């Protein structure tokens, strides 16, 4: 049953306004748009479900993790065993992403280091308690100079390439087509590692991107949280405008074992670590990896945990949703739980701020958006807390059924 067909005159509301408050819809619709006494019990049940404030439970839980860190295996200051011990105390899941130094892990160094990492990842993994992902940071040129690679299988081998230190478009396209990999670059907006998303085909778009690490934010060009260089072409918004469907997460890129910890001696925003929240069915390798590939992720500035739920038509962040061409309607829902009060919560639509909730508003909201701007629109949530910290969700995409 089509909810909007229950309200034949509701096309007036769609023509008159862009958004509507869902509880007003629920109350007024029964009085104004439904024929008095003509709606059936089935109609009323459908109305209750369609206009409910809270989204349905889907069995997913929130887990927090660190997806970017370094040790003595490359250029960090911890033994990898110590790294995993520290991460276990602070997170539900983690990955160690030591550099491969342009492919120079090959030969004896490659064999020894990668085998050691595989054994550590397997030995530190405790399903349901602490999940460890096999990963590394691929330093290669020119496609995503700094590219973190995460494996679903803890026994996987490092990626092969024809020329050390190089990644060709053909190699990258093959890797991105693999279902057992999650590939996500970082520093795309910096001069030394710049990426041009604007001229990139979808087949070469990554599975995700690191939107924030200490003092480096890649939401849009010249973001105020970015204390380093900024180059056009390498931001989240530019990737989205080019048609990318990618997961958003954050990491520390820490080399000293301070992942997930505040650094009081640092100024704002470098004092805050990047952290990732995932909505997963279980805290296992399979559960966390499925959530990453499904883009049910968000990045935020720690160390305090922030719980963010963002959905469109009751579908989690990261979902691609199809709607009828003739009646666009998107149920936008968000909630934010944080020890530090939210100062401003913004629904971003097609890279423009579309709805803003200030600190005097509730930290949860639901409304209906009637406006289709493109054949495929995208939405994501940006959260700003009173202390200046921020969070960003993976987008939801809504496309017309003809696409």
Image: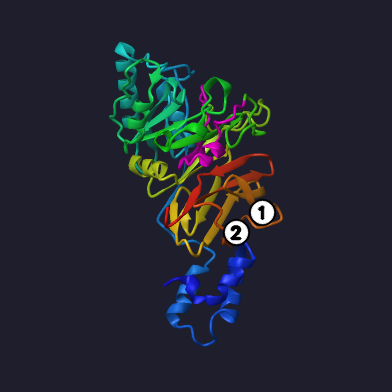
Answer left or right for 138 relative to 114: right
Asked whether residue 253 is drawn in magenta, I would say yes
Label 1 environment density (alpha carbons within 10 Å; few <14, some 14–19, many ≥20):
some
Q: Residue at x 43, y 26 (%)?
A: 97
Whole-percent x, y for residue 192 in the image = 55, 20
Answer left or right for 153 relative to 401: left
Whole-percent x, y for residue 193 in the image = 52, 22
Label 2 environment density (alpha carbons within 10 Å; few <14, some 14–19, many ≥20):
some
Q: Is residue 190 above or below residue 288?
A: above
Q: Is residue 64 above or below residue 23?
A: above
Q: CA distance from mark 2 to mark 1?
A: 9 Å
> Residue 159's mark?
none
Counting residues from the start of the chain, the first of labels 2 and 1 encountered is 1
Q: Nearer the viewer, residue 150 or 400?
A: 400
Residue farthest to the bottom, as pictured:
37
Q: Do the CB atoms of the residues marked 2 and 1 lie less than 8 Å apart?
A: yes
- Kind of element beneath mark 1: strand
């Amino acid at each position: 049953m089509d909810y909007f067909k229950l309200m034949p005159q509701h096309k007036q509301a769609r023509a008159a306004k862009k958004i509507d408050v869902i509880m007003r819809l629920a109350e007024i619709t029964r009085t104004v748009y439904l024929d008095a006494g003509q709606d059936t019990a089935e109609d009323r049940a459908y109305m209750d479900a369609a206009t409910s404030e809270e989204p349905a439970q889907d069995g997913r839980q929130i887990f927090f993790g660190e997806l970017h860190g370094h040790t003595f295996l490359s250029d960090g200051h911890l033994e990898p065993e110590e790294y995993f011990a520290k991460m276990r105390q602070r997170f539900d899941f983690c990955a160690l992403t030591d550099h491969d130094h342009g492919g120079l892990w090959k030969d004896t160094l490659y064999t020894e280091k990668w085998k050691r990492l595989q054994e550590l990842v397997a030995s530190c993994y405790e399903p349901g308690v602490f999940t460890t992902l096999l990963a590394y940071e691929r330093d290669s040129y020119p496609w995503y100079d700094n590219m973190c690679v995460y494996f679903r299988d803890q026994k996987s081998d490092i990626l092969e390439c024809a020329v050390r230190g190089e990644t060709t478009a053909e190699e990258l396209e093959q890797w991105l087509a693999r279902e057992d990999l999650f590939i996500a670059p970082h520093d795309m907006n910096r001069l030394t590692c710049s990426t041009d998303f604007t001229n990139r085909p979808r087949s070469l778009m990554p599975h995700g991107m690191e939107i924030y690490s200490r003092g480096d934010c890649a939401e849009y060009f010249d973001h105020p949280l970015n204390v380093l260089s900024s180059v056009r072409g390498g931001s989240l918004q530019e990737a989205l405008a080019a048609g990318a469907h990618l997961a958003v997460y954050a990491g520390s890129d820490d080399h000293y074992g301070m992942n997930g910890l505040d650094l009081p001696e640092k100024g704002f925003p470098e004092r805050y670590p990047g952290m990732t929240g995932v909505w997963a069915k279980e805290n296992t390798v399979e559960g966390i990896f499925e959530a990453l590939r499904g883009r049910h992720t968000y990045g935020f500035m720690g160390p305090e945990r922030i719980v963010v739920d963002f959905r469109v038509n009751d579908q989690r962040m990261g979902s691609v949703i199809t709607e009828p061409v003739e009646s666009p309607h998107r149920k936008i829902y968000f909630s934010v739980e944080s020890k530090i009060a939210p100062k401003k919560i913004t629904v971003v639509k097609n890279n423009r701020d579309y709805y803003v909730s200030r600190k005097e508003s509730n930290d949860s909201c639901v409304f209906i958006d009637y406006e289709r701007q493109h054949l495929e629109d995208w939405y994501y949530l940006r959260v700003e807390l009173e202390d200046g910290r921020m969070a960003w969700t993976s987008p939801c995409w809504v496309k017309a059924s003809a696409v």
